[in-house]
Image: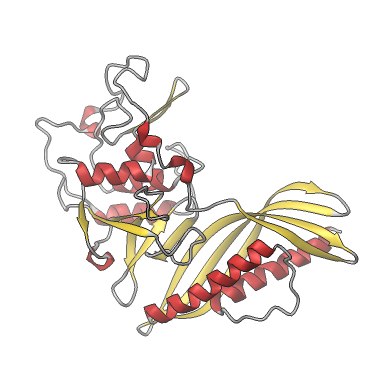
Amino acid sequence: MEQEWKQVLFTFVNQYNQFQIDERAETRYQVVTDLNYLMERSERSKRLGDWYKFRDAKPLRSETRATLLRTMNETPQEVVVDIQLHAHLFYSKGGMTHREDTIQQQRLKFIRDGEEWVIVSVEQLTTERHPLLQNVLSSNGTGDMYGGASGPYLNANILGGGAGRRSTKYRREDAVAYADRWWDSENPEFTAFAVNCTNYISQCLFAGGAPIHYTGNRATGWWYKGYLSGKEWWSYSWAVSNGLEQMLRTSTWGLRAEVVDRAEQLMLGDVIVYDWDGNGNYEHSTIVTAYDAGGMPLVNANTVSSRHRYWDYKDSYAWQENTRYQFLHIPDVF
């Protein structure tokens, strides 16, 4: 039985690769009967075809490796599994071949239909859309919300401070190196969140020399300590896109950013945040780590782990027509 449904999984991955490259790909043997998934795949494939034409890029091939993470249920008639899809997508632009990587997780439900197995449900377990975090900054953080702690536990030279602080250069190459080192794994020195995109970006900025601004108030500054006495000791700006965007845009010293108009104005180590619904709430964060042959930014991200992905994310299941972006240029000196 196991080999039968695993063969269907193999076909599913092959069809995934086909639709990454060609919106008109034919599937003589359709293994998925989930209509919502099929409609979404059709719309996404058409969007990708138009997207490549607009970018003057040509998709070449998609190589995806499926890893079985866990089996949730297995009977002679039904199997439910969680899988991880690690996709290498190759495309050409301006005479150069580019490669981008993405890692996402899905839950598949197989059922036996007569003598055949089919996939009746495809659920995205990782996504860039996180509506539950939109209003986290509405919390009324106070200085004593952490049990009256009087000050930082970390070295003051690392944490930084307002008065007498020396200027620090932003080491863009170090931020990018960190982003490429940890895009597909978790640095064990930091807490890993289920929604990890902004935590990852903050780590990249810190690796580039951005000074910690510790306030003891989760609604202000930019700081991280981890879990202490079972409590979360980090600022919203460290872990939430909306918080990071507000902090970068309004900060007057230390880590801060200038809002620029176009993606091509960004430098390595700069940040893009994403408002999928166009309602002013930013739900995803990325960092610029490379450029394509046309000089457009390629970005790294977490949650849906991504490396050298085209900045506008029109390949994302979270993207919509009213998606808006904020382009945040980090200064060379803090």
Vertical placement of 143 versus 138: above or below?
A: above
Query: Which residue corresponds to the image point at 45% horizontal and 62% vertical from the top-left?
Result: 320
Question: Colour mode?
Answer: secondary structure
Tell me if residue 57 can be seen. Answer: no
Query: Which residue corresponds to the image point at 37% horizontal and 49% vertical from the top-left?
Result: 282
Vertical placement of 127 versus 116: above or below?
A: above
* Residue 63 placement, left or right of 261: right
Residue 263 screen position, x and y as percent: 28, 65
Q: Residue furthest left?
A: 164
* Residue 315 placement, left or right of 259: right
Which quarter of the rendered picture does the N terminus lie within?
Answer: bottom right
How many numbered marks does the figure carry?
A: 0
Which quarter of the rendered picture does the C terminus lie within?
Answer: top left
Tell me if residue 308 can be seen. Answer: yes
Residue 157 screen position, x and y as percent: 21, 31
Q: Residue furthest bottom?
A: 95
Residue 106 screen position, x and y as percent: 63, 55
* Residue 203 placement, left or right of 229: left
**Image quadrant assignment for residue 83:** bottom right
Residue 308 screen position, x and y as percent: 40, 64
* Residue 7 placement, left or right of 172: right
Vertical placement of 163 versus 4: above or below?
A: above
Vertical placement of 64 versus 111: above or below?
A: below
Query: Which residue corresponds to the image point at 46% horizontal and 39% vertical from the top-left?
Result: 188
